[in-house]
Image (cartoon, grey):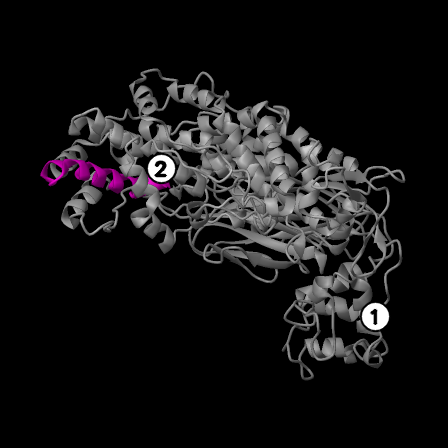
Amino acid sequence: MPHQTKIVTRRPRRPLAALAVLMLCAIGAFADDAAPSSKPAAAPASAPASAPAPSPMSAAASQPAAVASAKTPVGQLRVLPDSVRLDYPNDQQRVVVLFTDPAGVDHDVTAAVTFAVDGEPLATWTAGVLAPQRAGEQVATLQHAGLAAALSITVADAADPRPISFRNDVEAALMKAGCNSGVCHGNARGQDGFRLSLFGFDPEMDYVNLTRQTGARRVDVSDPAASLMLEKGLAQVTHGGGQRLAPDAPEYQLLADWVAAGAPDDPPDLPRLTSLALFPPQAVLPAGGATMQITARGEYSDSTDRDVTPLAVYSSLNDAVASVDARGRITTHDAGETFIMARFGTFAEVTQVIVVGDEAFTWPSEAKPRNYIDEAIHAKLRKLRIAPSEVCDDATFARRVYLDVIGIPPTVDEIRAFLADERDDKRARLIDELLQRPEFPEVWAMKWAEMLRIESQKLNVKGVQLYTAWLRDAIQRDAPMDQIVRELLTADGGNYQNPPANFYLVEREPTLMAENVAQVFLGIRIQCAQCHNHPFERWTMDDYYSFAAFFAQIGRKPSEDPRETIIYNSRRGEVAHKRTGAPVAPKFLGGATPEIPPGGDRRAVLADWLTSPDNPWFAQCFANRVWAHFMGRGLIDPPDDVRVSNPPSHPQLLRELGRRFVAGGYDIRALVRDICNSRTYQLSTRANPSNANDERNFSHARVRRLSAEQLLDAICAATGVKEKFAGLPLGARSVQVADARTGSYFLETFGRPARESACTCERRDDPTLSQALHLINGATIESKINAPNGLLGRLLAENQPPETIIETLYLAALSRPPTDAEHAAALKYVGESPDPTNGLRDLFWALLNSQEFVFQH
């Protein structure tokens, strides 16, 4: 990927014309676009010796069902859902019938299929809608274009219709009409004297306000049509929100029927909505106006389910690719990927929609998977008709993997040795070597320190040093990640004697601790649910406060050393629900309420659940954080924002990474080894015509600016001049700075996080004018270039010829030798300089200011 570097002057004494020659000719491209002396990486016939074996993931696990593969029949008919249960006489269930053509593209043929059963049908079929006729079980056959699919139908023996529920039906109808949104009556102050809870989080209040306020005129059971709720919804009377209902809409009929039934409240044993399912979960559709219906099905605590398609609220996460109407019908537009989100009650789910054009596509023959990661990435790229880039050359790979694994570039001797190595498995060998270097745990101790917000304003300097040393030691000795987290959550004793106890000094409020634990260890942001149910996720206020209750009984008291604090289980204390004021019992997020004996340590119970292999978030969250570090973005991105409206780009791969992480004993090195040995990690940044616009599917490597710590340590490594941080010995690396409060203008300018929150967004990698000015004119690079004991100073003292010095400077700064054109331009510039020493300094300065040096590629 060529990058032309803008010409800037560092000092007036530098001849601009000569610098222009250096900056444009010498460093006009990233390493994998140049460097003919770097051996290109041929794709091996099999995985490297130390790389993982190809994945045992089945085709069904590694590819969504809509993908045609070598084992898929030519043409396939699917009915979704393929099993229907009708529990009440007034039940209906929509199904979607998809024909998958030989190219793997889906077509909605629901209206065109033939419906047939043996004997008298148990249910009527009307363009994909089933309605019960009589009780029993039956298998229907759906036929289209010579293909068939089976549909299992069960009709319960129920005489009475399903009653209308305020919580399960009326609240959903109000959400469908937009009545309880934040811009309408769901506003904290309501609208025009009428208030509903935001998205129905407080149904008790909503019921009272609808049926008891304004003399009950909002609901008129004696004359339902005269109910103010219905008249305003139809705009028959003045309504600031305009018309929100149509007389023939399902939500209007439901509200009218509820009022006609006497506007009853729900019984105490009302079945609760427990999950929401969308059909199909994924589809590949042709571009240019193709349509497909979505079916939404709610599942309830009494083991029943029902079709909620008419009442769900739909939206597309990318309308340019495909849009969706109010009834769940998708229409495609341009090629690409989107997710269609449906909300019903407190749940939200998505359907993945890939839209493809009709252009011809051929998968490159050299793009062969090396492990399960490549299998999953390639499966989706094939669906998108995107070809991955070529594998990067050896020099680019070496620089990339050094910086990613240990945070510093290779030395001149290390890169020379790697480029000269002729072994086919040298990349896998290098990965294994780097994973055993002492710098590896330092990188991940720093990343943990950011997540855990380790800084001296909260902990004091000694606490910071001990806490960070404990993290570094744990990673160095391969302590499993679940063990590290367990020690943090269950920590007791003094924060000096037992450094994990510092975890409970960063925050002291149970609610804030709950927010941090959910975000750091599960990747879930529950902050929204503190005041109202989460608008785009399943988390409710009940979930928020019951999770915070795990941290309600943490005691703190001073030690004999006044600087130290002792953490202990106080055995008393509760969290009160903000809405009800009542104390709440501890409850797992999205899970059960555990039985905890009085005085029992709630944190130990939480740690058991959180680190359990059955926990759906813990392993995947950490695997995704590791993936994001090496790939430049997470499978869920940002990695600490797991929600339905932010779906993973490759859900099957994320599950497989999490599964292997658990199966491997939560070993971070094994996870890193898998990622770095994949072809996907080793791709070039150079795009091809098919993947030039792809930023989500890992079809090419991402160009990303080095982090603040990587950049400063790379400058020190390239120049051979050490940095000095307050309180640390000369030569300490940036990643070894334990305290975020340790002053460093360079690190602060380049986006080091202050560790004031657990959010990954605190680290900034966007370029700024201050950064550019500091690199160009600041003392960091200038002083290190001119240092007599630095690399250039030593080469000059050894009277090395300019040819040798130029090559060495390139290897030190860019981890590659110069091209012939670069070498000639640099030699010419140095030779024509009034002072050749200053000419070499100019060259070194230009290299250290180049995009190729400042960016990871």
Q: Position of residue 629 (x, y in %)?
A: 49, 37
Task: Answer whether residue 604 is visible to the viewer in this image.
Answer: yes
Res 576 → quadrant: bottom right
Asked whether 527 or 354 is in front, the reply is 527
**Which percent across, then down, holds residue 778?**
33, 48
Residue at 33 percent of width and 52 percent of height: 773
Q: Indicate which disc, 2 or 1, sits on the residue closer to the N terminus.
A: 1
Q: Quadrant of the C terminus?
A: top left
* Quadrant containing the N terminus in the rendered view: top left
In the picture shown, does residue 529 fall above or below 760? below
Residue occupying the point 35% across, 33% down: 721
User: What secondary structure characterizes most of the magenta part?
Assistant: helix
Q: Amino acid at mark 1?
A: Val
Where are the magenta residues, as a range? 830-857
In the picture provided, is 620 more to the left or to the right than 803? right
| Image-quadrant location for residue 366 | top left
| Amino acid at dot 2 | Ile
Label 1, residues with CA under 10 Å away: few <14, some 14-19, many ≥20: few
Q: Nearer the viewer, residue 183 or 360?
A: 183
Q: Residues within 10 Å of mark 2 (few under 14, many from 20)?
A: many
Residue at (78% x, 49% y) in the render: 546
Cα separation, mark 2 vs mark 1, equals 67 Å
Secondary structure beneath disc 1?
helix
Q: Magenta stretch containing residue 844, yes or no?
A: yes
Per the image, the residue denoted by label 1 is 208
Q: Is residue 147 visible?
A: no
Which label is found at residue 498?
Answer: none
**Residue 235, image x, y percentages:** 66, 80
Q: For mark 2, what is the residue? A: 715
**In magenta segment, residue 295:** no
